[in-house]
Amino acid sequence: MAVESQRFATLRPRSQAAASRPDGFYAGVPLHWMLDWPMPFPLIIDCAQGSVITDIDGNALADFCFGDTGSMFGHSPGPVVQAITRQLARGMTHMLTTEDAMAVGELLQQRFGLPHWQVATTASDANRFALRVARAVTGRDNVLVMNGCYHGAVDESYVTLLDGKAVNRPGVIGQAVDLTQTSKVVEFNDLPALEAALAARDVACVMMEPALTNCSMVLPRPGYLAQVRRATRDTGTLLLIDETHTISTGPRGYSGAHGLEPDLFVLGKPIAGGLPASVWGFTDAVAERWTHIRATKPAGHSGLGTTLSANALSLAAMRAVLSEVMTPEAYAHMDALAQRLSEGFERVIRSQRLPWHVLRLGARVEFAFSAAAFTNASEAIAAHDGALENAIHLGLVNRGCLITPFHNMMLVCPQTTTEQVDRLVQAFEQVTRLLHARS
């Protein structure tokens, strides 16, 4: 880290000088997560286009992070830029619907199969609103999540297992209530634990990713998701599938690729090409019950929706993404290059006899510090090595490649090239050989 930190600083004198100036932001960044990158000072970006991100010192990086999926279809896709440019002069937000909105609703129905949709600003919001509806239509208070899950800033998901017992996640700041009073948590892939947690029929909704993506990657065992669907139906529990990360699987997400049948569906991050936007969909049965409940309530705040949700600018971008960017052809390109990336990393791992493995979910690739694939989050978390991750990540940056800082996740986009993938594989080989030489 000492060697790579010095190399990083030598390449970025302007960024270092800019980062040292007081700017009014807490810790010098507009969002504290920006400090999670393993860099001696923040990387200050000048521009991002396609699959390349360039800092103010002129260093160009092949991007394999894409804003942690927010720009999964590349930075500033042409159709999105054109749609935004057209809409800018016609109004950005007015709390009224547009022709773009009508088109988006139809495109969502066609793509994901659910008949009813709403728009929010982030996937965190979409999950919150969907959970509120789930509790209303079932008359139940509890929510069940998977240990190690990722659902943004949703309170109900901030629980974890400690020695087999549910506790509030230790890292959560300012938590005033015990979340375990209304949230249950089980290990992913543990069907008996799920069935036991649902047996009391007091769970409104199981909120889950079809594959865990934020504690490293954990794929479902064969048949597991079908068994989850059966168990939820048997107990009158709604099933919410959050595809905010697993949309990397294909044009219709993991749900469409594997025939899942969620009652509620959430998708955020890349749906508007990088603008803050998300969608949540639901079945006729949920819609019917929700409509009945709304009819019994007095007019006023429902707790669903924020003022800037469904703004005209985001809807214009969303229409462009769904109709012109998020195409089968784009996914075919991404899938092929992700396969090349996965095979390249596996080759390096084998050649150096590292006890690691590689996983892929469509355009998403991850390497993990374990010889065997994980079956749950506890196994994945136990294999984390923060110092080793940081050294590899910074070494890759210094060799022209940027991957996601939170763990060892990489994405390819429609503009990613074979040469960029091969550069990342070569950089990974160079860094791991240096680490071997020093161990």
Image (cartoon, rainbow, N blue to C red):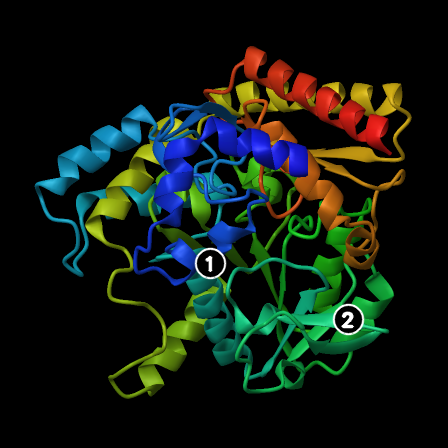
* Mark 1 burial class by Cα count in 10 Å: few <14, some 14-19, many 20+: few
In the displayed structure image, the side of residue 370 where residue 83 appears, left or right:
left
Q: Position of residue 112 (x, y in %)?
A: 49, 44
Indicate the quadrant where residue 415 lies: top left
Identified at 84% across, 35% down, the residue is 356
Identified at 47% across, 50% down, the residue is 34
Identified at 77% across, 75% down, the residue is 197
Q: Which residue is mark 1?
A: 32
Indicate the quadrant where residue 204 lies: bottom right
Q: Which residue is mark 2?
A: 161
Residue type at tag 1 = His
Which of pointers 1 and 2 indicates the residue nearer the eye? 1
**From this viewpoint, is residue 408 visible?**
no
Instruction: Name the quadrant of the C terminus.
Output: top right
Give above or below for 316 relative to 172: above
Q: Position of residue 361 (x, y in %)?
A: 67, 35
Q: Position of residue 14 (x, y in %)?
A: 37, 34
Most extreme residue toward the top is 419
Most extreme residue toward the left is 89
Q: Position of residue 188 (x, y in %)?
A: 77, 58
Q: Is tag 1's residue or tag 2's residue first in the polypeptide sequence?
A: 1
